[in-house]
Amino acid sequence: MTSAPNSDPNQRGWYELEPDREAGLRGRARVAAEAFATIYIALIATVAAVSGIYFIMFPELGALSYDVFGRPRGHWSNSPVQLALTPVFTAVVGIVMTRNLPYGFVSVMLTVIGALAIILALRSPVAPAISAGLLPLVLGIRSWAYPPGILLGTTILALLSILWRRYHSVAQENVPRDREPDALPGGIAWLIALLMFVALAACIVKITGLRFILFPPLVVIAYEMFAHEASCAWADKPFRLPVAAFLASAGGFGFWYLLGATPLTAACSMICGIGVLRATRVHVPPALAVALLPMVMDAPTIAYPFAVGLGTLILTVWFYLYRRILGWYGSPILRAVI
């Protein structure tokens, strides 16, 4: 049988299912944290609009800021240097691949493998850095200004995280302590499953022509699911993930369609994404990146949220099969081997 998710709330990952037991700020403090995250995103969007460098509005900043402000003792807040630099290193990989290879199966696989190698080599907890590597390839960004643009947003967020953490330490808020950052995932089963999913999704993109079936934050979600599957508290209700992703992407697309790529759109999309997480009761911060992604897309269409929903549904089914296979064929023996 499939192993049950860890029931200890202190051992849950950053994608915890039950908001009322979620490690981090609560009540009015949590609302304030969400407000600060929204203001931060609006300010970054303003800088992007004023400068004309649209990719400064890196969508994963929504996920990062939501977790940093919502969990001042979380592992992203406790790793400000890695928070600032890991996405920049993977962004360089993405630009190199985009400038030298066309979008396709080979370039996608090499980009994902390169981003994973950086994260594992640095022992970085900042999984959204994978998205920073894949985003240029998906959107066709070839400018070397992209990594510095990423650095601007992540550095500001890292500095704010230090101040935010110190404030809550002084104020002695009733904030449960988060667990230490996850160790590097053991074995290779998770890596094989993850790369097979990316390969499958890339093939489906080729067949359908819907590039955003493999939207960059999806690989971030997949990495957390496969690399740290024992902490995946919402695995027993997997179909909440595609619902949350579809609703967040539909909301983000709707605001972009009505308001254009403006700071107000970024703020509204962020609020919409937060509302979706609360309504579906599935704490998946990359859903906020999905809501913000239309801000940096070239003329998104109504197909976008449906592609996102399909991509997350494929991931959900693939993860379910992965868990079943490990259970059917003797989990202890299989895990010992791979």
Image (cartoon, grey):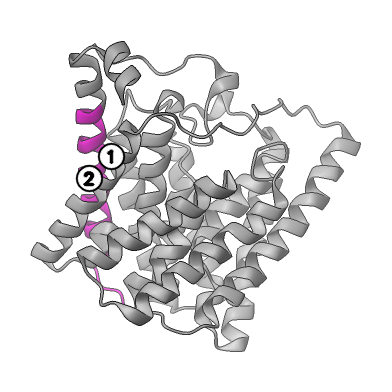
Write the residue at 18% across / 66% down: 210
Asked whether, in this view, residue 85 is left or right of residue 240, the answer is right
Element class at badge 2: helix
Write the residue at 36% across / 57% down: 112
Report the disc number at residue 192. Answer: 1
Whether label 2 touches label 1, CB < 8 Å: yes
The residue closer to the viewer here, 87 or 311, is 87
How many numbered tags mark residues here?
A: 2
Q: Which residues are magenta?
A: 300-322
Q: Taking 296 as reference, is 6 above or below it? A: above
The answer to which image quadrant residue 85 occupies is bottom right
The answer to which image quadrant residue 70 occupies is top right
Q: Residue furthest front?
A: 337
- Around disc 1, counting alpha carbons within 10 Å, would you say few (fewer than 14), some (14 to 19), or many (20 or more)? few
Q: Amino acid at mark 1?
A: Ile
Element class at badge 1: helix
User: Could you say where residue 167 lies in the image, as x and y percent from the top left?
Assistant: 86, 44
Residue 266 visible, this angle: yes
User: Could you say where residue 311 lies in the image, as x and y percent from the top left?
Assistant: 24, 51
Residue 48 is inside the magenta segment: no
Asked whether, in this view, residue 213 is left or right of residue 34, the answer is left
Q: Amino acid at mark 2?
A: Met
User: Could you say where residue 159 lies in the image, as x and y percent from the top left?
Assistant: 77, 58
The residue closer to the viewer here, 300 or 120, is 120
Q: Quadrant of the N terminus?
A: top left
Which residue is tagged 2? 196
Write the residue at 41% across / 35% down: 227
Characterize the magenta stretch by its predominant secondary structure: helix
